[in-house]
Amino acid sequence: MLARRFLLGIDVGTSGCKSILVDEEGSVIAKSVAEYPLYTPYPGWAEQEPEDWWRATVATINRLLRESQVNPKGIVGIGLSGQMHGMVPLDAEYRVLRRAILWNDQRTAPQCQEIVQAVGGEDNLLTYTNNAMLPGYTAGKILWLREHEPEVFDKTRIILNPKDYIRFRLTGQFATEVSDASGTGLFDVKNRRWSDKLLAILQISTDLLPHCFESDQVTGWVTRQAAEETGLPAGLPVVGGGGDAVIQTTGMGVTKEGILGLIIGTAGIVAMGLESFKENPQGKLQIFCNNAPGTWHAMGVTLAAGGSYQWYTQTLCEGERIRAEDTGEDVYALLEGSIMSAPPGSKGLVFLPYLSGERCPYADPAARGSFIGLTLLHTKADMTRAVMEGVTYSLYHVFEQLRELDKDMKVTAAIVSGGASRSAAWRQIIADVFQLPTRTVTGSSEGGAYGAALVAGVGCGVWTSIEEAVGFMQIESETEPNGALGDIYGEMLEIYKGLYPALRQTFTRISGVKF
């Protein structure tokens, strides 16, 4: 009888590190989380200490092994996930030179413009990377470091993304993989390699970047030193893994065309696997390499999805929050009933969820949130439902951009994760707006760590492919669309899509007023 085998998935997130153990049937056996601080020395800046990531990784692995009582020798592979786009510069002695600059740091807008100008415009940039240049990407951070901290840049010998720093601490190897590399702004996504032409234009040496693997390839093995710290066996293989925005959809079973993934956390991600490379017209979407060789990942991001509902609850639902505190109930559960009492379409009330500006399909930091269509007939329940519907309209708007990649694409279902997946009302709204069966699946709540464990299983021979790995997932809930609401929501979507163009100049004027 074969001994039971386990996979370790590690996710280096923005708020903390999560480590999970998964068995060869795809079941989560144990999990552990450790938090660490975020530093904002100036408005718009976001930094972290890489050593904090490592301490949290060690702590979660130690706790995982202790509490699960799994024999570490039963673990056959490690997969890594992590926040994308960050920059960790190391010197010739492999010491961290400064705090990591994170994905949500906005200081590099001027450098992004420099890059666009250097290549001769945005259309030319797309020929190199198939993606627009966003301030969060690593490329702008490298230019910023060279311009503003030249003494640090001159000492820099290698630049790593967050999860790849943990890889270095585990294995002593400098490596990345194709999905995370896609989010640097320096990667030839079509050909799955660093863009030598773009690097030459920007005068960035290829020596500063790690060797790039496919996500399921073994990139190194746990060293004796790392084994002593973590309790893992020395020699344990570590596969490439993936950037969190990509690998968490792998952990939802969203790996090929026809299945839509909706991740509704603070932001909203609309994603789909692609079985062939697709051009990215105007760079509205983000198209990255996926976690299986020869596949890609398309997604669009809205900036205030669950964040809009959280703002609404904190700002306009004081009575419900007080009642929840008094009774011990969950405030979101209290609101659930009122949402179902309001009619679909919220009596013509539309909420624009642009509370943090917007990224897709409109890249506009000046966009503002709005309630449109309020009358004396509207109730609190209508407003609550309108917020959920408005966020869902924004996700559908991104979905339309995905469909533009291939007009013959047939989409059969949506899989949802994040906070919204726990709301039956929101799942029904999604099903009705998209007119698609809407599912939740096992493991999807574990984020990138679960996807990383699955990819590790493929790379270490537990499964033969990603498709076999995700085949173990089970449907936890399935919500069928109400076909009778297709016309109502179709009309409301058209109204929604007309509002941003009509209000764009007003948003710009408002953003320019100094209060």
Image (cartoon, grey):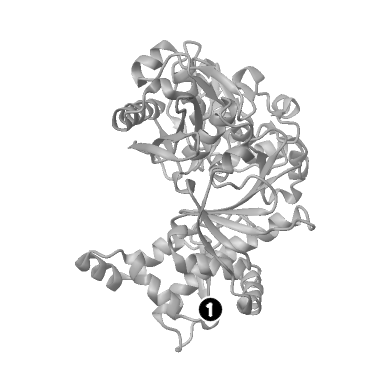
Query: What kind of element bears circle 1?
Result: loop
Residue 90: x and y, percent? 49, 19
Q: Residue drawn 53% across and 46% down?
A: 473
Residue 314: which quarter of the image? bottom left
Q: With 79 as the anchor, is 295 left or right in this view?
A: right
Q: Is residue 163 visible?
A: yes
Residue 465: which quarter of the image? top right
Report which residue position mark 1 lands on: 344
Q: How many marks?
A: 1
Q: With 155 as the anchor, is 17 left or right in this view?
A: left
Q: Is residue 509 visible?
A: no
Q: Residue drawn 66% across and 72% down?
A: 498
| Quarter placement of the C terminus | bottom left
Under mark 1, the amino acid is Pro
Q: Residue drawn 67% across and 59% down?
A: 412
Observer-nearest of 68 and 15: 68
